[in-house]
Image (cartoon, rainbow, N blue to C red):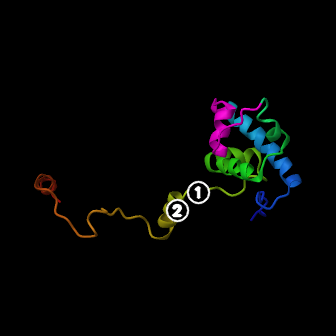
Amino acid sequence: MAEFHEVDWRNASVQDRIAPNKALFRMMQQLSRKLDVHFDVLLEEAQEQAVSNTEDPHRNFRRGGISKERSHKIHEWIARNHFEWAQKKEPQLFQVPRKSDWEQFLENAVFQAGLAVVNPQGLGIANRLPPEENQAWQAAGR
């Protein structure tokens, strides 16, 4: 098993975050071109806030000098939405796939006992088929 090396954004010093932040900037640029979506649109979605209206709003990001909160949000957004691509580009930064709660539930349910479809309105009680469905079911020889 590979050793875990993803950045601990909360505890990393400013100096420790510079290189990973620069890598995130390059990746966001590449994603912008790959998806044909303006860089600022992706950045707003990833960092969950509007891009600054300053003359050069990306200067600090390009230099690797953004806050750990922004870094963490951008990193997690890339990991959730483009993990396989990101892992190929920056394997040291993207080692652990992110899964939604629903994906995690499905994975656990499928591997442990399979899935069962249950009518949430039925409270686990058997229901009769409507007459027309019952007749079709009986005609089919079931």
Give the magenta-colored segment's residue range.
34-54
Say which label, 2 or 1, has the lower sequence index.
1
Q: Amino acid at mark 2?
A: Glu
**Is residue 95 shown in magenta?**
no
Q: Tell me which residue sits at (73%, 46%) in the image.
A: 88
Q: Tell me which residue sits at (50%, 63%) in the image.
A: 105
- The answer to whether residue 107 is left or right of residue 38 is left
Residue receiving disc 1: 99
Q: Quadrant of residue 27?
A: top right
In this view, the residue in front, 130 or 45, is 45
- The answer to whether residue 111 is left or right of residue 95 is left
**For mark 2, does the 10 Å Cα neighbourhood hold few (<14), some (14 to 19), or many (20 or more) residues?**
few
**Residue 5, placed above or below residue 45:** below
Work out which residue is located at the far front of the displayed protein and give it: 54
What numbered label is drawn on residue 107? 2
User: Pointers 2 and 1 in contact (CB under 8 A)?
Assistant: yes
Q: Amino acid at mark 1?
A: Lys
Q: Tell me which residue sits at (76%, 51%) in the image.
A: 91
Mark 2 vs mark 1, CA separation in Å: 10 Å
x, y percent for residue 51: 69, 37
What numbered label is drawn on residue 48? none
Element marked by disc 2: helix
